[in-house]
Amino acid sequence: MDESVRKAMAKWPNVPALYGWLRLDATGRWYLKGEVITHRGLIDFIGRNYQADGHGRWYFQNGPQRGYVTLDYTPWILHVDSDGALRTHTGARVGPGASAAIDDQGNLLIATERGVGLVDPDALPVVIEWLVHGDGRCADEEALAAVMAGDTDDPLFLEVDDRRLPVERIPRAEIPDRFGFISTPRPEDEDDAG
């Protein structure tokens, strides 16, 4: 978090939070009141001050004011850089956590040390090559379709950063609960969160 943000929070500690203004889409683009943000400095500032509270609500700390983020999919969107490393939409390099998942719509998710991330469609051709069967054979489209349909006893694994992560099938609607985040924070969540 930026030092200027910390100072503003200390100076004005009780500024009400904003809801419904900031949105993160499934490719990692930020939207402010429905308009895509294109200013590189603002995008970087949001990325440096983007985090979650203890209840799974993601927000951007803008000085003393917290702006809760509506998530189109997951809190992180994952890209693959030119060295083959996973990076978040904010540019942070991340390593894999304990699992990966394919939803019922064919989206690939990877749990990282920062939280779960959706693999950006542009990165899928690279990441798909990391999918293997238990015996090490590369997974093909047929194997992926079988996992998506929940119609196989042949598990797939994602090999990334010298780790082999089991790939589970998960319905898209269950992803926020399974990975512990709130897609659309609301003011009434304040009472529940304490």
Image (cartoon, grey):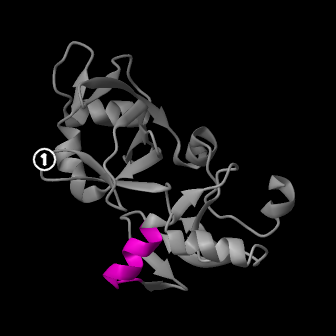
Q: Position of residue 133 (x, y in %)?
A: 25, 20
Image quadrant assignment for residue 9? bottom right
Magenta span contains residue 120 = no
Label 1 SS = loop
Q: Position of residue 105 (x, y in %)?
A: 42, 49
Badge 1 crowding class, 10 Å Cα cut-off, few under 14, some 14 to 19, many 20 or more, is few
Residue 116 or 51: which is nearer the viewer? 51
Identify residue for label 1.
Answer: 83
Residue drawn at x 32%, y 80% is 40
Residue drawn at x 19%, y 32% is 140
Q: Position of residue 173 (x, y in %)?
A: 58, 49
Is residue 64 something that shows in the picture?
Answer: no
Q: Hey, which residue is sitting farthest top in the picture?
A: 135
Residue 78 or 106: which is nearer the viewer? 78
Is residue 172 something that shows in the picture?
Answer: yes
Residue 104 or 100: which is nearer the viewer? 100
Task: Write down the region rendered in magenta.
Answer: 37-47
Left or right: where 56 falls relative to 128: right
Q: Is residue 100 positioned above or below 23 on the image?
A: above
Q: Is residue 10 positioned above or below 39 on the image?
A: above
Image quadrant assignment for residue 58? bottom right
Residue drawn at x 60%, y 68% is 6
Q: Which secondary structure dominates the residues rendered in magenta?
A: helix
Q: Position of residue 74 (x, y in %)?
A: 49, 54
